[in-house]
Image (cartoon, grey):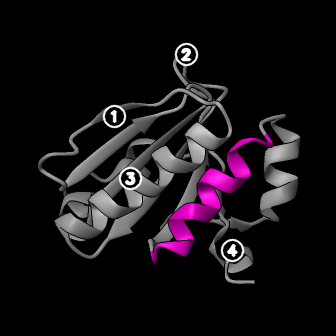
Amino acid sequence: MILKQTISIGKFVRKRKVSKFKTVIKGLFEKKGENILAIDVSKQSTYTDFLVLCTATSNKHAQTLADKVVEEAKKSKLSVIIEGYQQGEWILLDLGSFVIHIFLQDIRDLYDIEGLWHGMPFYSIEEELKN
């Protein structure tokens, strides 16, 4: 079982000096992304500071979530590298300090990113996004 901490999204992003990403992450919730989770990988990863995981209910829903991330990133003048958009089963959006993974539930279960990063701090930010 993976232990998750609940943390204010504002505190989370301020702590990591990446406030531009707050709007991007909120976009996932606005478009009905499910089980949104952040993993702080900054002490183990050389390519990003943290991962944001989100579940989509269909391929089209995954693409809609990715479109929202890209839209919000452009507003914040952030560059985004996208992989997996056409298939829509697992879409990866690389924003430098953040890498967002949007999965269908069966793909998320299969690849178990949470399990790969066992021992790293996990943050549930979904509760605050509801407000």
Q: Which residue is mark 1?
A: 82
Q: Tell which residue pokes out farthest to the top in this image.
A: 46
Cα distance in 3D space between marks 4 and 3: 17 Å
Q: Position of residue 10 (x, y in %)?
A: 84, 57
Dot 3: few (<14), some (14–19), or many (≥20) neighbours within 10 Å?
many
Vertical placement of residue 42 versus 66, above or below: above
Q: Which residue is mark 3?
A: 66
Q: Which residue is mark 2?
A: 46
Callout 1 amino acid = Ile
Callout 2 amino acid = Thr
Q: Quadrant of the C terminus?
A: bottom right
Q: Main secondary structure of the magenta part?
A: helix
Dot 4: few (<14), some (14–19), or many (≥20) neighbours within 10 Å?
some
Which region is colored magenta? 19-32
Q: Inspect the magenta stretch and tell me whether residue 3 lies in it.
A: no
**In-front residue for pair 74/6:** 74
Cα distance in 3D space between marks 2 and 4: 28 Å
